[in-house]
């Protein structure tokens, strides 16, 4: 996870496969169907493989041959502009064919799926186009009065019995019975790829509630390890790497500090030793020079008092050297 917006669309497509599991031999589900060479694409296109077949699933009873679906995540709002965009997609899809009239308007339906009832959009369509919203079932509304059959599906209002996974594809699940029921249902289908995709998104979208429930639910702990094991390992590895890096930096800093301290002490000791050595040498040289000068002056008959004055030493020192 990222971090960024959650990827709801793949999970929605997976949920559709679950919803229509009993009728996948009758329909074909295409995610992000490309409308044309231009960057326009339908969220989901469901095509009935054979005409004359009736779809029994509640959310698919409106379907004809070609069914354009627009999905809005729980974080998004379905607006009037979304309606006209998808309506335009349906028109483009009808016209973008090899032969004129290859797809008839009556063969196309529009489905809008969202988490909240789009009251503003439906009110606008009623005023401007005379479309009426008619409830056909739990969470299913038909917009009557257009050439295209149109329905709006409100996921949170769908039947928990008939549309369990699509109804749970949201970010406001509650810790307790709701999440435990979800786990029980998932346990029966945990090896199925589509169920895994839907559950992965649900867990990520409801992390805080899942964390709260995980404290009391062993099954959810296992699910977390199964779903986020790699992420947890990566997080641990990153933490270890940061710890090692910080430790290395502190170690180097401390080592430099200690090294400088030892270096200064060693330098000071060596300096003192060298100074003493050089001082002794210099002292010996100066003493030898003065002794030679004293003997030379004495040989020339210079008085001892004057020799002491010229060589900057005491009279006693001159006498000591001459002895």
Image: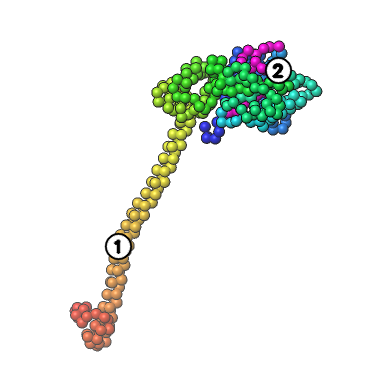
Specify which label sits upstream in the sequence, 2 or 1: 2
Residue drawn at 67 percent across, 22 percent down = 132
x and y percent of residue 60 in the render? 64, 17
Relative to 197, 241 lies left or right = left
Residue drawn at 66 percent across, 29 percent down = 124
Q: Quadrant of residue 89?
A: top right
Coloring scheme used: rainbow
Q: Nearer the viewer, residue 106 or 213?
A: 106
Report the disc number at residue 273.
1
Q: Is residue 161 visible?
A: yes
Q: Nearer the viewer, residue 153 or 42?
A: 153
In this view, the mark in front (2 or 1): 2
Residue sitting farthest toward the front: 127
Q: Nearer the viewer, residue 135 or 200?
A: 135
- Give the SS element for disc 2: loop
Mark 2 and mark 1: span between their CA atoms?
Answer: 101 Å
x and y percent of residue 71 in the render? 62, 26
Please rate how many residues cluster around mark 2, counting C-alpha atoms within 10 Å: few if below 14, some from 14 to 19, many from 20: some
Residue drawn at 79 percent across, 21 percent down = 101
- Give the SS element for disc 1: helix
Residue drawn at 40 percent across, 25 percent down = 215
In this view, 103 is above or below 274: above
Question: Magenta segment range?
Answer: 52-73
Dot 2 and dot 1 residues touching (CB under 8 Å): no
Is 62 one of the magenta-colored residues?
yes
Which quarter of the figure is the C terminus placed in?
bottom left
Please give the residue where the numbered disc 2 appears in the rendered image. 65
In this view, 210 is above or below 51: below
Relative to 291, 102 lies left or right = right
């Amino acid at each position: 996870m990222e971090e960024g917006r959650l990827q709801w669309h793949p999970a929605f497509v997976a949920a559709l496969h679950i919803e229509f599991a009993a009728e996948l031999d009758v329909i074909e589900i295409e995610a992000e169907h490309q409308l044309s060479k231009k960057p326009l694409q339908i969220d989901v296109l469901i095509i009935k493989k054979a005409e004359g077949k009736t779809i029994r699933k509640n959310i698919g009873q409106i379907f004809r041959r070609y069914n354009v679906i627009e999905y809005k995540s729980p974080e998004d709002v379905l607006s009037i502009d979304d309606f006209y965009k998808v309506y335009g997609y349906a028109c483009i899809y009808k016209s973008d064919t090899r032969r004129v009239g290859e797809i008839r308007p009556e063969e196309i339906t529009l489905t809008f799926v969202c988490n909240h009832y789009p009251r503003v959009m439906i009110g606008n369509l009623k005023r401007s186009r005379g479309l009426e919203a008619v409830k056909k079932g739990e969470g299913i509304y038909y917009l009557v009065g257009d050439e295209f059959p149109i329905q709006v599906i409100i996921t949170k209002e769908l039947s928990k019995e008939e549309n369990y996974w699509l109804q749970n594809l949201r970010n406001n699940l509650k810790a307790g019975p709701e999440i435990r029921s979800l786990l029980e249902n998932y346990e029966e289908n945990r090896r199925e790829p589509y169920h895994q995709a839907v559950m992965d998104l649900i867990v990520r979208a409801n992390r805080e509630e899942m964390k709260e429930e995980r404290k009391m639910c062993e099954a959810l702990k296992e699910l977390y390890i199964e779903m986020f094991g790699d992420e947890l390992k990566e997080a641990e590895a990153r933490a270890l790497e940061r710890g090692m890096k910080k430790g290395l930096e502190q170690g180097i800093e401390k080592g430099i500090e200690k090294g400088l301290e030892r270096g200064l002490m060693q330098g000071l000791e060596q300096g003192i030793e060298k100074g003493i050595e050089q001082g002794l040498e210099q002292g010996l040289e100066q003493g030898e020079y003065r002794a030679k000068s004293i003997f030379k002056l004495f040989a020339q008959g210079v008085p001892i008092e004057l020799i002491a004055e010229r060589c900057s030493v005491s009279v006693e020192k001159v006498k000591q050297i001459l002895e």
